[in-house]
Image (cartoon, rainbow, N blue to C red):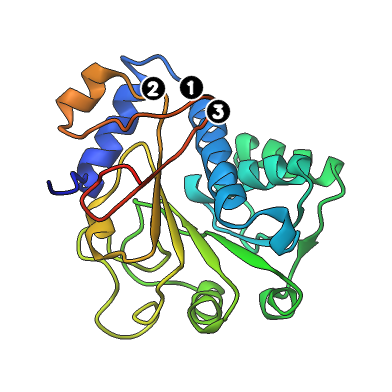
Amino acid sequence: MALKTLSAKAAAALDRDLMCTGAFSIDQLMELAGLSVSQAVYRVHPISKGKRILVAVGPGNNGGDGLVAARHLCHYGYQPTIYYPKRSNNELYQRLAKQLEDLDIPFVDDFQTALQSSDHVLDAVFGFSFSGEVREPFPAVIQAMSETKIPVTSVDAPSSWDIEEGPPKSGIGSNFHPDVLISLTAPKHLAKHFRGRHFIGGRFVTPAIAEKYDFDVPAYEGVDQIVEVGPDGSRL
């Protein structure tokens, strides 16, 4: 059985369907996505392995998922630190950032220095809408994540990877292979090139949506918002 995946175009259309015919708001989807991400981190990196989680946040929806995940991780007992160099003027992202500031979660300007005192990295820089060139200040961040011995979990896509083809053949990100990938809603085509631990988080997807976009909704257990899957998409 092959892992069923989505193209970037299909993933964008699916999100529009969730917000249109599915009646979800962007706030709801981001909250559910961030909750799923936080559960994946909790699963692969329990607090006994270290509380210090460095969250690398990009300027778009992927970054928003990271901000939400950081809030949940704080409430679980972790000590997140946020690297958010390109803050958005969008009210939603401003509110998410304020929620973290109200919890006294630190925001840092130097990713490299913060990395040296972290136990786990959450890569929430670029998601499935990424294309083109990696712009400053993120080339050095992606390079640092590719070189570190600290475990890295990527949100929906390893940052800099082509959504259809996976890691770049050369340059920034060509050697970036995170330890964990959490695919939101459904895996994207790049997941076929990923060899680490793979989770799916999308417990809000209806059977009709899954049928329309031809992917499988995994069997979530209990209160879990995530399911770990193998290379063929089967539950582990």
Locate residue 14 relative to residue 85 in the image: left or right.
left
Residue 218, image x, y percentages:
31, 33
Q: Residue at x 45, y 68 (%)?
A: 178
Q: Is residue 12 visible?
A: yes
Q: Which residue is mark 1?
A: 25
Q: Residue at x 85, y 41 (%)?
A: 102
Image: 13 above or below 71: above
Q: Amino acid at mark 2?
A: Met
* Distance from the alpha carbon under mark 2 to that under mark 1: 6 Å
Numbered disc 3: secondary structure: helix
Category of crowding for the residue at label 1, using alpha-carbon neighbours closer than 10 angstroms: few (below 14), some (14–19), many (at least 20): few
Residue 222, image x, y percentages:
51, 24
Q: Residue at x 21, y 46 (%)?
A: 5
Q: Which label belongs to residue 78?
A: none
Query: Is there a contact, CB below 8 Å, between mark 3 and mark 1?
Result: yes
Q: Which residue is mark 3?
A: 27
Q: Amino acid at mark 1?
A: Ser
Numbered disc 2: secondary structure: helix
Query: Is there a contact, CB below 8 Å, between mark 2 and mark 1?
Result: yes
Locate residue 5 relative to residue 43 in the image: left or right.
left
Q: Amino acid at mark 3?
A: Asp
Residue 166, image x, y percentages:
26, 66
Q: Which residue is mark 2?
A: 19
* Distance from the alpha carbon under mark 2 to that under mark 3: 10 Å
User: Going from the N terminus, do you reach mark 2 or mark 1 first?
Assistant: 2
Category of crowding for the residue at label 3, using alpha-carbon neighbours closer than 10 angstroms: few (below 14), some (14–19), many (at least 20): some
Image: 153 above or below 66: below
Q: Is residue 52 visible?
A: no
* Distance from the alpha carbon under mark 3 to that under mark 1: 5 Å
Image: 50 above or below 205: below
